[in-house]
Amino acid sequence: MAEKKLMYGNHAIVEGVLAAGCRFFAGYPITPQNEIPEFMSIRMNEIGGVFIQTESEIAAINMLFGAAAAGKRAMTSSSSPGISLMQEGISYIAGADIPVLVVNVVRGGPGLGNIAPAQSDYFQATRGGGHGDYFTITLAPNSAQELYEFPKIAFELAEKYRNPALILADGLLGQMMEPVEFSYKPFDPETLPEPPYALSGCKNRERRIVRSYDLKPGKLEAWNWQRQKKYEQIVANEQRFQATACDDAELIIVAYGTCARVCDAAARMARAKGYRVGLLRPITLWPFPSNILSALAEKTDHFLVVEMNMGQMVDDVKLATECSKKIFFHGRPGGGVPTPPEVYGKIETILGGAR
Amino acid sequence: MAEKKLMYGNHAIVEGVLAAGCRFFAGYPITPQNEIPEFMSIRMNEIGGVFIQTESEIAAINMLFGAAAAGKRAMTSSSSPGISLMQEGISYIAGADIPVLVVNVVRGGPGLGNIAPAQSDYFQATRGGGHGDYFTITLAPNSAQELYEFPKIAFELAEKYRNPALILADGLLGQMMEPVEFSYKPFDPETLPEPPYALSGCKNRERRIVRSYDLKPGKLEAWNWQRQKKYEQIVANEQRFQATACDDAELIIVAYGTCARVCDAAARMARAKGYRVGLLRPITLWPFPSNILSALAEKTDHFLVVEMNMGQMVDDVKLATECSKKIFFHGRPGGGVPTPPEVYGKIETILGGAR
Amino acid sequence: MPQVKILEEVCKGCGLCCDEVCPVNILVLSPDRINSSGYHPAEVTDNSKCIGCGYCFKICPEPAIEIYK
Amino acid sequence: MPQVKILEEVCKGCGLCCDEVCPVNILVLSPDRINSSGYHPAEVTDNSKCIGCGYCFKICPEPAIEIYK
Amino acid sequence: MKQLFGRPAGLTDISQRYCPGCGHGIVHRIIGELLVKLNIRERTIGIAPVGCSVFADEYFNCDMIQPPHGRGPAVSTGIKRSRPDCIVFSYQGDGDLAAIGTAEIVHAAARNENITIIFINNAIFGMTGGQLAPTTLPGMKSTTSVQGRDIKKQGYPIKVCELLSGLDGPYYLARTAVDTPKNIINTEKALKTAFTYQIEEKGFSLVEILSMCPTNWGMTPVQSKKWIENTMVKYYPLGEYRNRAKEEK
Amino acid sequence: MKQLFGRPAGLTDISQRYCPGCGHGIVHRIIGELLVKLNIRERTIGIAPVGCSVFADEYFNCDMIQPPHGRGPAVSTGIKRSRPDCIVFSYQGDGDLAAIGTAEIVHAAARNENITIIFINNAIFGMTGGQLAPTTLPGMKSTTSVQGRDIKKQGYPIKVCELLSGLDGPYYLARTAVDTPKNIINTEKALKTAFTYQIEEKGFSLVEILSMCPTNWGMTPVQSKKWIENTMVKYYPLGEYRNRAKEEK
Amino acid sequence: MTTEIIISGFGGQGIVSSGIILSHAGLYESKNVTFFPSYGAEMRGGTANCSVVISTEPVASPIVATPDIVIVMNEPSLTRFEPALKPKGLLFYNKTLIKSVPKREDITIIPVEANAIAEELGRGRIANMVMLGAMIKKTTILKLETLKRAQRKRFSRASDEQLSLNDRALDRGYGLF
Amino acid sequence: MTTEIIISGFGGQGIVSSGIILSHAGLYESKNVTFFPSYGAEMRGGTANCSVVISTEPVASPIVATPDIVIVMNEPSLTRFEPALKPKGLLFYNKTLIKSVPKREDITIIPVEANAIAEELGRGRIANMVMLGAMIKKTTILKLETLKRAQRKRFSRASDEQLSLNDRALDRGYGLF
Ligand SMILES: Cc1ncc(C[n+]2csc(CCOP(=O)(O)OP(=O)(O)O)c2C)c(N)n1
Ligand SMILES: Cc1ncc(C[n+]2csc(CCOP(=O)(O)OP(=O)(O)O)c2C)c(N)n1
Ligand code: SF4
Ligand code: SF4
Ligand code: SF4
Ligand code: SF4
Ligand code: SF4
Ligand code: SF4
Ligand SMILES: [Mg+2]
Ligand SMILES: [Mg+2]
C-alpha cells in the first residue's frame, strides 16, 4: 500500500485526472471548486499539459469539445450555475458521440444560491439538462480517495461508449481534506491510442467529420436509435453501487456522495440500537443501480432516500423498486447538510419507536 | 363566435401573447420558431411594445429577468439548443420567484440536430434543466388555437405562483397553418396591477431586492422549503388534461402536443375496428396530470405512451400509475413524427391481433 | 487560346460572371438552356476572345467554370 | 474648525486615510486600540490642524469618517 | 454643527463585507452620494453583479436586482426598456464584465442602451479567490497564474475602454481610479457625467474604475493604492475615451 | 491541355447547397485552393459554423468539426492547444461571430490564439431567413426590422475589425470583399497571409469578408454585388486593420 | 371525408402560396384545414413543398405521409413524391418542365402544361394557378369561386390586374378537362 | 473513538493551519481524519473556522455540528460556537483577545492566554500553536511529538528559526497544565 497523503478533495480530483492521462483542462473559476483550476494550473505547468482559464463555462465546454474531438482526454470542472451554462455544449458533445469528463462540484441552488454543499443537480445530471434524447454517465464519489480514483473510471467509460461522463461531487467533498492513497500507476498519455474519430489532419487516411447534426430526412432519427442501443448497453453493464448490510435489512437507506457518509453514521447509530439498517449507495447515478434495488425490494420493506435536495432521486428508487414499497424521504435543499442524528431520527420514526 | 383566421402556429403564439397583455419580447432567431420574433417585431411596433432581437439566448433570458422583475409580462421564445443556453437564467428566475414565459418550439436533438418537430426536451422542461430544486409550469398545446390561448393561461399561472412558465410546442405546431379564433378579449396591459416584487423605483415605499441567493446559513434552505410548498400547491391544483373516450377504454394512449393529434387519428382508426381506445392528453406536463392517470389505472389495463422522443414521459406515467400496469411505448426521436397507421399498428399488437 | 468550360449542371445561373466581370465580355446567361436544377446556365459567346484572366472563375461561387490552355 | 470623527466600530483599520492622503498628516492607525472586529481603527492626532478637505473621507471605503463644521 | 462629509443617504446602514482597504467601498460611497445629489434614488434600479460586490444589493439604498454572472447589461436592458423613466445602473467587476459577460457588454454598448455601467477593474477575480482576470497585467501573479501572467499562454489583458471605443454605439466611456483623492474626485465627476447622460437620455455610458484588491494582490491597502499609482495606471491610462457630447459641440 | 482554373482539390466534389450568387461559395473556393497551395490540407482541421455554411463540413476536403453556434473560436482553441501542429481555421458568419459568439471571438483574439478566423459578413442572418444581424446596416431591412434598422432601437452595427483593433492580442486583422475580381484577389491575398501567419506561429488572424446574400437581401446576385460595391464598402472600409508583422519591421 | 395533398416544386414556383390558397378556400367552405410547409434549411438549394389537409372532421396530423393528391411542379419533386402517393391517388404534374414520365400504374396521372399555359397568359409564375384550377376540377374538393376568393385573400396587396390574371389562370386550368 | 473539533477566529490567526496540523498529526498516528474549512464568501469580512474529525473508525460526516472540542481565538467566534459545543465538551478560548466570559455551565471552559504567550515568544501570530499545545495536553488525543512533526509538514517552506519557534509555542501551551 502506497503512502497516504492528506489532500483536499478538489486536489485529489486533479491528481486523479492527471494520473488518468488527461492533459487538457479548460475551466472558469467558481466556488466551491476553485482549487481544481488553481491546482491544475500548477500541475499542468509542471507536467507540460494544457491549462486554460476560459472566458466562461461556455467557452470551456466548447474547448473541451475541440480537444476531445482532436482525440485527447479532456476535462472541465465547475459548479451548478456554470454547469447549467454548459448544457448546450454537453448536448452537442453527446450528439457527436465524443467522450469528455465534466466535474460538477454542486452547490446550493437554484440561481446564484449559495456555496454550501448540495445534490440538487441530480435531475440535470441524470436525464440530460440539455435538449434532445441523451444521457451522461454519472459517477458520485463520496471521499477524497474516490475523487482521485473516479476520473480514470470516468474516462474509461466515456471512451468505451463514446459519451460524455460526469462526476457529481459537492462543496463538502471538494473542500474537505482527507488522506488519499495514489492507488494506481499513472497513465502515460502518449500510450493512449488515437481514437477512430479523432481529428488530427487527414494524412494517409480518409478525412473525418465530427458533428451532431443531420438534416437529411430520417438520418438523425436513425442515429438516435443507434445511440439508444448504446444507452441500453450501458444500463445493462455499468450499474455500480456499494451495498452495506443490506442483506437482512428491515430498512435500506439509499444515498450517494456526502449523504451516503452521513447515512453511514446514522446507520451505525441505528444498528447500535438494534435496528437492521442497510445502506445502498449508488455509485453510478446514471445508469442508476436499478437491478440491485429491484432485487432488494423483494426482501426489504422500507426504503429511505436521503439527499441534499428535495427528493430528486426518489423517482429513480420508485421506478427501480416498481413502486412496490413505500419510499420514505429525508432531504435538505439549498445547501443544507443532513446530520447523522437527524437521519437516525427518521429511521426511528419509520421503524416505529425506540428499541 | 368570432371569425376564424388562418394562421401559422408561430403567429398564433404572437397574437396570444399580445392578447395576454405582454408587451416585452426578447429573443434570438432559431428555426423552427423564427416567425415568432419576425411577426412579433412587426406587431410590437404596431402596438408600441418592446421587441428586442438579442445578441444571444442568454441575453434574451436575462432581459426577460429584468423586464419581469420590473413587473412586466415578458416572454422569449427559442428552440432546443437556445433553450439549453437559457438554463442558468431560468434557474435564477425560478430562484428569484419571478414569473416569465418561455416558449420552446422543440426541434430534433441532441446537439444541432435538425429542424424537424420533436418532443425530446420533455425532461429538461419538466424537471429543471438548470441547477437546483425548481420546476417550471409547462403547458403543451396541440393546435394553433391553443397556441393562441395558452400564453394567457401561462402568464396567469406564472403570476399566481410567481414561477417561470414554459410552453412546449414543436416545429410542426409552429410551422403549420390552421384556423384560429380570437376567443377572448385582449388585456390592456395598463390595467394589470403592479406586482408586489416589482422594481420600479422606491418612491413612497420600501426599496425592493430581487435575487436568488442567500449566503446566510440556513436561509436558502428555508427559502427552498417555502418554494416546495408552492410546488405542492401547483401539483394539487393545476393538473390539466384532456381525456377522450377513456372511461371504458381497454387501452389508453397517453400523448401530448403533436403526438396527441396523431394518436387521436390512430385512436379513431382503432375504434372503427372495434377496439376501445382512449386518449389521455396531458396539457400540463408539469404538474403532470397524475391524479387522472392514477384513477384511470384502476380500471384500465393497457397504457401506451407515444412521444416524439425516446420515452421521456414514460417515467411520469409509471409513477402516476404506481407501476401497476405495464406501460407500452412508441416513440420516434431526432425529428421523426409517428404516423397514425404506425400507432394503430402498435395498438393492434398490444391488444392482440386484428378484430 | 484559353478554353472556357462552363459546367452546366453545376452552374446556378447567378449571372455574377456575366456582369462587368469578364474584361472581354463574352459570358451571358443562356436565354433558353435550362439545367436539371432549373437554372439557366452561363454560356460563352465567343471563346476566341478569352484572355484567360480567370476573373469569371474567381467570382463563380460554385465554381462552375474551368479554364484550360 | 472642522471636526473629524472616526467611527471606530466601522473602521477596518485599512490605513488608506493615514498614508499621504491627509494634507496636514493628522491621521494614524491607533497602535493600541482595537475594535470588536479586531481592527486597529484610525485616530486623529491633532484635530485643530484639519482643513476640512474631506480627502480622508473620500478615500475611506466604509466610510468610517465623518467631518463636521 | 453641520456635517460636511458622512455616509450618504444613498447607502443603507448595513456594514459592508469588503476586506479592509477594498476599492469597492469607495465607489459605493460615490454612487450613494450621486443617488441623492442627482435626486434619482427613488427612481433608480441598480444591478449588483456576481463578484465581491454581490452584496451591493444590500448596500445601495434603492431598488436592486442580482442577475447571473456577467449578465448585468442584459438585465439592465430588460429593465430600462420596460421602465424608461427609471435610472438603471449595472455595477460589475472585471471577471463579470470582461470575461463571462463580454458579449452582453459589447452589445449593450453597440445598442447605445440608455444605461450606466460602473466597471470595477481590480485586475483579479476577487470573490473566487484571486484567479487571473481578463484585466490581470502581464507578469502579474494570480492563483491560476502563479508564475505571473504569461502572454504567450494566457494572452493579453483586455482594455475595456479601448475595446469599446471600437464601437460606434457608446456615448460615454471613461477610465478613472480610486487610489488618490485627486483620482477619486475625477471618479466622482465621471460617474456624475455618466448618470447625467442617462438622465438626459443620451445613451450608454461606462466608467471603468481601477480599484484596490489588497486581499488578492497580497498587499496591504496602502501598498495596493501605490501599485495602482505606479503600475496599473501605466497599463490602463486614465481619461475619457469617448464623450459624444464633446464631439457634438 | 492544362487546367488554368478549376475546382481545387481542397474542396470535395459535393455540390454546394448555397443559393445562386451566394458569396460563401467564392470564399470556399479560395480556402480550398489555399489548403493545397500552402500544402496544409492533410494537417488542417476546419470548423464549420452554425449558419448557411453549416454544410461546409462536407465541402472542405480536410478534417472538419461542427460546433455550437458562435463557439468556433473556443472549439478551435481546444483543437489547436491539443494539436499545435495542425492548422486550424474557423469559418463563421456575422450572426455566429458577432452576435452569439462575441465573447469567444474577443477572447480568442485577446489570447492571440494561433488560429485563423474567416468571417463572412453578409450583414444578415442568412440561414434562419434574413433577420437583423449585428452587422446589418442602418436603415437596411431585415425580417426583424421590416422598416429598416433603426439605430435608436436596434443600435449601431458592429464593425468587427475596428472592435478587435481595440485589443492588443490579435496579430492580423483585415477586411476584404468578394464583389469584384479585384477584391476577390485581395481576399485571396489576405487569406493567404492569415494562414501563413498561423503556419509561422504568429498568432491570431481574422479576415472579414463582405459577401453577398442575394436571397435575404431581396436582390439578384448582380444587384447584390453592386450593393457591396456602392453601399456596404462605404460602411465597412476595406483594408488591413492590424498587421503586427509590418509593425515589427 | 379527409383529403391530403402535397404540392412540390422549385422555390419561386408559388408552392407555399398554392397551399395557403387551398387552405383559405377550405376554411371558406367551412372545412377543417391544416397547411404545413417545408421550412428552414430544407429551403436552401431551391426546392419547396407543403402539405395541405382538408377535412370535414378535425384534422389529426397535419403532416402528410401518404397523400391522396400530389401536385409536382418540377422534375426533382416528381422523383420525390410519386412514390409517396396513395394507391389510387391523383398525381398532377407540370408537363412543361418535367420531362420524365411518371411510372406508377396504380395511380391516376394527370399531366398539365402549367408553365406553357401560364406563359401564354403572359406570366410563367402563375403556373401554380393553372395547376390549382385543374386540380379542383378533377377532384371537386373545392369550388372554383372559393379558390378565386382565396387567392385574393392571399395576394391582398397585389394589383387588380394581377388578381384577375390569377383568376384567368385558375379558369384555364379549370377548363382543361 | 471519534473526536470532533471546531477551530474559529479571525482570518490571519492561523485557523486553517491549526486544523491541517491536527489532521496531519492524526494521519501520522494512523487515525482516520477529515478536515473541513469554511470557504468562499464566508471568508470575506475576516472570520474563518474549520472542522476536524479524528477517529479510529472511517469518518462519516466531515462537517461538525456538535463538536466535542471548540477552540475560539476571538470574540465573535465565542458567540458563534459556544452554543454548538456538546454537553460536557471542552471550550478552549483565547483569553488575551476575548473579553467576554463563556456562559455555559455544562461544559469545561479552558481559558488560555494564547496571544499574550505568543507575544512573549516574540510573535503574536503563533498564538494558534500555543492553543494547540494546550488542547492536546488537556485532551490527550494526540501526542506533542506528532504535532511538532505535523507543523513541520505544514510549514515545509518556513525557516528553521520559525519552525522551532512554533515548537516552543506548542511546548508552552502543552506546559500550561
Ligand atoms: C456562471 C458563473 N460562473 C462563475 C461564477 C463564480 N464567480 C463568482 S464571482 C466571479 C468573478 C469575480 O470577479 P470580478 O467580476 O472581477 O469581481 P470582484 O470580485 O473582483 O469584484 C466568479 C467567476 C458564478 N457565480 N457563476
Ligand atoms: C444556440 C443557437 N441559437 C440560434 C441558432 C439558429 N441559427 C442558426 S444559423 C443562425 C445565424 C446565421 O447567420 P450568420 O451567422 O450570419 O450566417 P449566414 O447564414 O448569414 O452565413 C442562427 C441564429 C442555433 N442553431 N443555435
Ligand atoms: S477567363 Fe477572363 S476573359 Fe476569359 S471568359 Fe473568364 S473572365 Fe472572360
Ligand atoms: S458565376 Fe458560376 S454559377 Fe454564376 S452564372 Fe457564372 S458560371 Fe454560373
Ligand atoms: S478632512 Fe482633510 S485635513 Fe482633515 S483630517 Fe481629513 S484629510 Fe486631513
Ligand atoms: S480609511 Fe476608513 S477604514 Fe481605513 S483606516 Fe481610515 S477610517 Fe479606517
Ligand atoms: S477580495 Fe478584493 S475585491 Fe473582494 S472584497 Fe476583498 S479586497 Fe475587495
Ligand atoms: S441565404 Fe444568403 S448566405 Fe445563405 S446560402 Fe442563400 S445567399 Fe448564401
Ligand atoms: Mg475583479
Ligand atoms: Mg450572415
Image: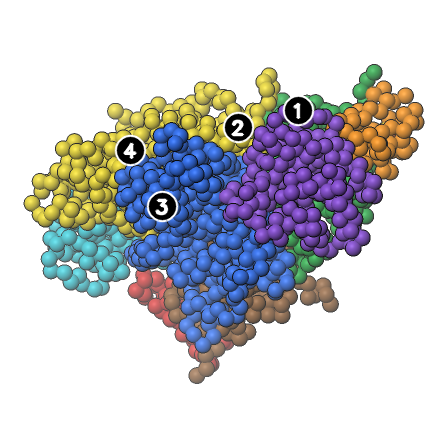
Chain colours: A blue, B yellow, C red, D orange, E green, F brown, G cyan, H purple
> CA gap, disc 4 to disc 1?
55 Å
Q: Chain of mark 1?
A: H
Of the residues shown, which amino acid type is indicated by label 4?
A: Ser
Reading the image, the residue beneath label 3 is A246
> CA gap, disc 3 to disc 4?
32 Å
Query: Residue A100 appears at what percent x and percent y?
Result: 47, 57
Q: Is residue G116 visible?
A: no
Which residue is more in the foreground, F123 or A43?
A43
Badge 4: residue crowd in 10 Å (few <14, some 14–19, many ≥20): many
Badge 2: residue crowd in 10 Å (few <14, some 14–19, many ≥20): many
Reading the image, the residue beneath label 4 is B290
Lower position in the chain sequence, tag 2 or tag 4: 2
Residue beneath the point at 73% across and 38% down: H177
Share a chain, discs 1 and 2?
no
Horizontal placement of H47 versus B328: left or right?
right
Reading the image, the residue beneath label 2 is B70
Of the two numbered discs 2 and 4 in the rendering, the one whose residue sits closer to the viewer: 4
Of the residues shown, which amino acid type is indicated by label 2?
A: Ala
Reading the image, the residue beneath label 1 is H103
Residue beneath the point at 68% across and 34% down: H92
Share a chain, discs 3 and 4?
no
As drawn, A116 above or below G96: above
Share a chain, discs 2 and 4?
yes
As drawn, F222 above or below E39: below
Which residue is more in the foreground, B208 or B222?
B222
> CA gap, disc 3 to disc 1?
46 Å
Query: Residue C57 appears at what percent x and percent y?
Result: 47, 70
As drawn, B296 above or below E147: above
Residue beneath the point at 39% across and 55% down: A95
Asked if the residue at tag 1 contacts the one at tag 4, i.e. Cβ–Cβ closer than 8 Å, the answer is: no
What secondary structure is found at the residue carrying circle 4? helix
